[in-house]
Image: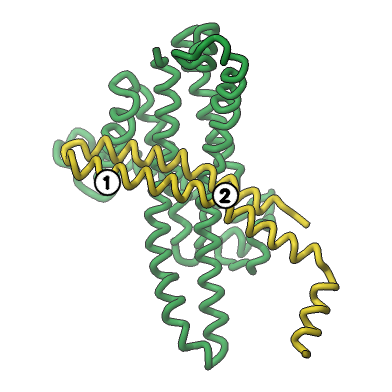
Amino acid sequence: MALLHLLLAQVTSDPTKGLTAIGRGIVYGGAAIGPGIGIGLVVGNAITAMARQPESAGTVRTTMFLGIAFTEALALFGFVLAFIISG
Amino acid sequence: MNALLGVDVPPISHVTIWGNGPLGINKTIVIYGFATVMTILVFWLGTRRKDALVPAGLFQNTAESGVAFVRNQIIMQTMGSDGLGYLPYLTALFFFIFFSNITEILPSVQFPANARFAMPMTLALATWVIFNVVGIAKQGVGSYFKNSLIPPGVPFFLLPLVVPIEFISTFLVRPFSLMVRLFANMLAGHLILVTFATLCAALFAKSVTIVILPFSFALLVAMTGFEILVAFLQAFIFAILTAVYIGGAMHPEH
């Protein structure tokens, strides 16, 4: 009961603060889903290519890092946006 | 004075705000000075005995393997032999970003200067200016914009849709994402290290929670090792993306 009272007091004191934190979490979490899948696809296919043709591993590795960099940018936009959000 | 020496450890709320020293000199500026001096020093000391066939010494080995790395892994893979003229710029870019990133794991400094976005923004704008100037110089103004705004093989009816998208992605998002990629990666890595370090300190304070301390500490050590990789990888990615953009402006797609 005391815990509930404490929680209620916190909820009613400053509701926007908690909502901002939730919003930040949702923004970054949502922004990380797509790039996570994308980086998995890029690296998985790069490993398949390297295993099939080990002599082209150098070129594939460079292209893989490029693909990771382009995919990762979206997740980082979300990361920066989560900092920009202010309640 | 503490900020000048780079020895003060700010509380976690100071992660995005940094106090100034005299003349606005803060820890970030000091680290950039260190990175500049190190970049110059490596190539200055490394090329003093360049007539000798067998490289010897730390600086000469670093300089020669660095140049060979940028030449073989960055320029030859993306631009071909036409781009070898950009070798000095890309090598300096790579080493400067690497040295200002690696201070993230340097004991008692432990702050990557690129976690503040002023210098990544400046470097990204330099890349933006270079690839635009190279494209205009190599192809002429009209055909450069035509080649970069209209991808080959697009039907005529789609042009009102495609041209604005290509304009935004080529001229606006490219420098912005170049900046954000470097800055946000270093900031995120720094925040992770700060989080685990403060967690270790908080766990150490109470005798009950000290049982969990080894796990947190092990992860801190592992993340520190991972950040060495990230510091190298971000310098590599910034240099290779610069090379890709310059190469794309030099050789348009047909």
Tell me where residue B171 sits by quadrant: top right
Vertical relation: B186 (above or below) B74 = below
Mark 2 nearby-residue class (10 Å; few <14, some 14–19, many ≥20): many
- Chain B visual colour: green
Residue on which the image places disc 1: A47
**Residue at the image point whose x is 66% and y is 53% from the top:** A83
Mark 1 nearby-residue class (10 Å; few <14, some 14–19, many ≥20): some
Disc 2 residue type?
A: Ala
Q: Position of residue B195 (x, y in %)?
A: 55, 68
Q: Are marks 1 and 2 in contact (CB under 8 Å)?
A: no
**Residue at the image point whose x is 23% and y is 35% from the top:** B50
Q: Position of residue A37 (x, y in %)?
A: 44, 48
**Residue at the image point whose x is 26% and y is 35% from the top:** A59
> Could you tell me which quadrant the C terminus of chain A lies in?
bottom right
Q: Which chain is yellow?
A: A
Same chain under badges 1 and 2? The reply is yes
Tell me where residue B81 sits by quadrant: top left
Disc 1 residue type?
A: Ile
Q: Which of the two labelled residues, at mark 1 and mark 2, occupies the earlier sequence position?
A: 2
